[in-house]
Image (cartoon, rainbow, N blue to C red):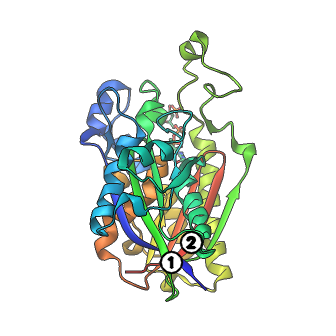
Amino acid sequence: MIKAAITAVGGYVPDYVLTNEELSTMVDTNDEWITSRTGIKERRILKGEGKGLSDLVIPAIEQILKKKNMKAEEIDMIIVGTITGDYTFPSTANVICDKIGAKNAWGYDLSAACSGFIYGLATGAQFIETGRCKKVIVVGGDKMSSIINYNDRATCIIFGDGAGAVLLEPNNEGMGVQDFILKSDGAGRNYLYMPAGGSLEPPTHASVDANKHFVHQEGQAVYKFAVTGMADVSADIMERNKLKGEDITWLVPHQANKRIIDATAQRVGVPEEKIMMNIERYGNTTGGTIPLLLWDYEKQLKKGDNLIISAFGGGFTWGSIWLKWAY
Ligand code: UT7
């Protein structure tokens, strides 16, 4: 059976570094609190007028095209996992196709918050496995700074901007996506969401004044769901595929809070040196965390490596993918 393998990775984070020290001048916080509660030291911010998500994603896709010596016209499909697209509509996938000249591609944005990339990876894999598409770009990325209230100290400290992308291609050697478990529970929607701006409450002066266009997160509640959700689903996918901790080359966890990551690793028996981690440098880039990990660790990956990729996010959405690295 044809499998969908990742054959290239690209990533991009903007230059501006927002440190814990700088945040301490903006809200009542300090480096010690942020580091001990979350593991984050700094995050990147896309500064400047007239820049949106597509400005983060395009450099990542261009790296892939360069690495693979490929033309944009060869891309069949682009799926963008994000909650901060350039516009409400059209989709950022649509904008990107135009900007990079992917004239033969179609695609769409996929809204699953921090699980956007894994939802996208599972979706893109279907188009490869059925033979419909030969080259699918799956993107995860967010310009979180566009929806963060920098007066809310419990929320602004964890998020940052960044995006990553992978190329999916057919593989006949058994490499690529092996299995996935994806979950969602809309009962969690009020713990982590953006209250206004959608059709339920369109923008008004009052909604802006009430800070309803920023992320609302009830941190403790989300933490509790995330810690069990991400650990359980990672354990489930390993159990149903008879994988033990020692079979896993890398755990690739969504980077929301180092304590959630550590709990997941402990639950599935993966030691610290096998956990991909870059939360200290980028914080939580929502859809971006997982492809940015693959980008950062690409050189350490080898053909046949077993990766367990797991995420938990707003919605709630969560899940886990077992993937064999193809190069
Ligand atoms: O990626 C999508 C999914 N999101 C997540 O997975 C995030 C999950 N949640 C978390 O990671 C954590 O809940 C946070 C990092 C967001 C917050 O950490 P916490 O340990 O849950 O803190 P808390 O909200 O329970 O607040 C504890 C105390 C409070 O003070 P009192 O009431 O005990 O006096 C807060 O006011 O810490 C205070 N606090 C802060 N102090 C210094 C909250 N934020 C800060 C801050 N600096 N930035």
Q: Which residue is mark 2?
A: 128
Image quarter hosting the N terminus: bottom right
The secondary element bearing badge 1 is classed as strand
Q: Is residue 236 left or right of residue 281?
A: right
At horizontal 58% and vertical 84% (from top left) the residue drawn is 243
Residue drawn where x is 56% and y is 34% of the image: 89
Q: Quadrant of residue 48?
A: top left
Q: Quick check: 238 left or right of 252?
A: right
Q: Is residue 204 above or below residue 35?
A: above
> Which residue is pictured at 54% across the width and 13% down the height?
209
Please tell me whether residue 140 is drawn above or below residue 158 in the rendered image.
Answer: below
Query: As displayed, is residue 201 above or below residue 215?
Result: above
The residue carrying pointer 1 sits among few (fewer than 14), some (14 to 19) or many (20 or more) residues within 10 Å by Cα, namely many
- Looking at this view, is 287 or 87 the one in front? 87
Q: Is residue 253 left or right of residue 160?
A: right
- Measured as percent of width and height from the top left, residue 184 is found at 70, 54
Residue 170 has which mark?
A: 1
Q: Which mark is residue 70?
A: none
Across and down, in percent, residue 84 comes to 50, 38
Amino acid carrying mark 2 in the image: Ile
Label 2 SS: helix
| Along the viewing direction, whichever of 205 and 174 lies nearer the viewer | 174
Q: CA distance from mark 2 to mark 1?
A: 6 Å
Give the image location of residue 188, x and y in percent: 70, 44
The tag earlier along the polypeptide, 2 or 1, is: 2
Q: Amino acid at mark 1?
A: Pro
Cβ atoms under marks 2 and 1 closer than 8 Å? yes
Ligand 1 closer than 8 Å to label 2 CB: no
